[in-house]
Image (tube, grey):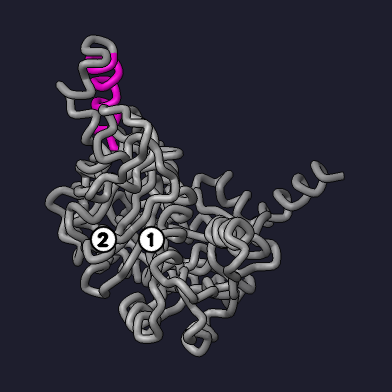
Amino acid sequence: MTLAEIKSLDQADPLAAKRDEFFLPEGVIYLDGNSLGALPKRVVARMAQVVQQEWGQSLIKSWNTHGWIDLPQRVGAKIARLVGAEPDEVVVADSTSVNLFKVLLAALELRPGRKVILSDIANFPTDLYIAQGITDLLKRHELRLVSKEEIESSLDEEVAVLLLTEVDYRTGYRYEMAHLTRLAQQKGALVVWDLAHSAGAFPVHLNQAQVDFAVGCGYKYLNGGPGAPAFLFVARRHQAATRPFLTGWMGHADPFAFSPEYLPAEDLRRLTVGTPPILSLSALEAALEVFEGVDLALLRQKSLQLSDLFIQLMEPLAARYGFQLATPLEHARRGSQVAYRHPEGYAVMQALIAQGVVGDFRAPDILRFGFTPLYLRFEDVYQAVQRLAQVMQSGLWKEARFQERAKVT
């Protein structure tokens, strides 16, 4: 595909205007939105308002006059549209890891007599660490790790919870959510999905797939900023029976009664714990406004077009320099990132970043490129591959390797 043809794709892009809503460094092609989203311009104005006016002038009155107290539910309702849930099924609180701890414990209690948490051995490590910690805490469960290919055959009557991340953080492989949820439930298990690499990248259909529980982060495709609060989803049918194990005051039915006895809130507030982080919640709320009016089907369409173009343009480099595609070609099995394996992956990525193309590396050998449809152009994809070609042809990656080894020695 020629550069002129690629530029014509940008001219016809219905999401092209969204790029102007973000701060993007001059000369940098940002392909790491799957680790940290770019800064939406409206977040800057919103933070100034919260800090200078609400905190600075209204002080403690802002909990009521500016609606601080309702932020976890209000922001959760905005995320709900992006993940196919009802507004009262999503709440924003804590980190992804803490939320996983909460919903995984709750799910296990809903399946007494079953002892196994089943997961992919290649799942994101923090998810596995949380599950390991729970098995150590309870002393009556086990974490069973299998390959992707073994998930279906490993679903048996011992499994209490199937724990999976919809999109593999290394390769971009996308699980078939509806199919696996149905299979697990047919065996009597509940399912917890991690949406860290899904929410905001493409439409997620939690209720359509009859998902039980889900968690996700706010700082990747949702662009909420470094360390942004995470979210959790509990299907309405499970909420009354979902027991909170972290019983903090904000999860109380009447937190300002200051009763010495804990009584959980009737709604999803029961899975909140402590005082909400107002500054970071406000940043995330403002960031989510960039999704207003966005057709999520178009978001998905552009995501696939961007990654298809990248794979196509990479074919000559793959053949010449030994890059091995680790991401599925099948659209249904692909998230919004593309990964390549290369024995010198770390050095290549460092050299590429030095040339203004920001992707990232995952051990042992994966170069990872994220495609965020709201602010990435088709021409960016073309230029990124051109710069990678220069890195390989000029041997700049060898320089990066030498410098890294010099540091170690």
Total tally of numbered discs in the picture = 2
Work out whether 186 lies above or below 253.
below
Local packing at callout 2 (Cα closer than 10 Å; few below 14, some 14-19, many 20+) is: many
Quarter of image, res 294? bottom left
Range shown magenta: 40-55
Q: Residue 337: horizontal and vertical position, in percent?
A: 43, 63
Q: Quadrant of the N terminus?
A: bottom left
User: In front: 145, or 262?
Assistant: 262
**Residue pointed to by mark 1:** 195
The residue most toward the left is: 293
Q: Is residue 42 magenta?
A: yes
Q: Mark 1 touching mark 2, by CB under 8 A?
A: yes
Mark 2 belongs to which amino acid?
Answer: Val
Please identify the quarter of the rendering in which residue 251 is found. top left
Q: Amino acid under label 1?
A: Leu
Q: Is residue 397 left or right of residue 102?
A: right
Q: Secondary structure at mark 2?
A: helix
Q: Residue at x 34, y 48 (%)?
A: 271
Q: Which residue corresponds to the image point at 68% horizontal and 56% vertical from the top-left?
A: 395
Instruction: Check disc 2 and report the residue beneath it.
Output: 83
Q: Residue at x 36, y 40 (%)?
A: 262
> Which residue, as the protein is rendered here, is positioned at the far right?
409
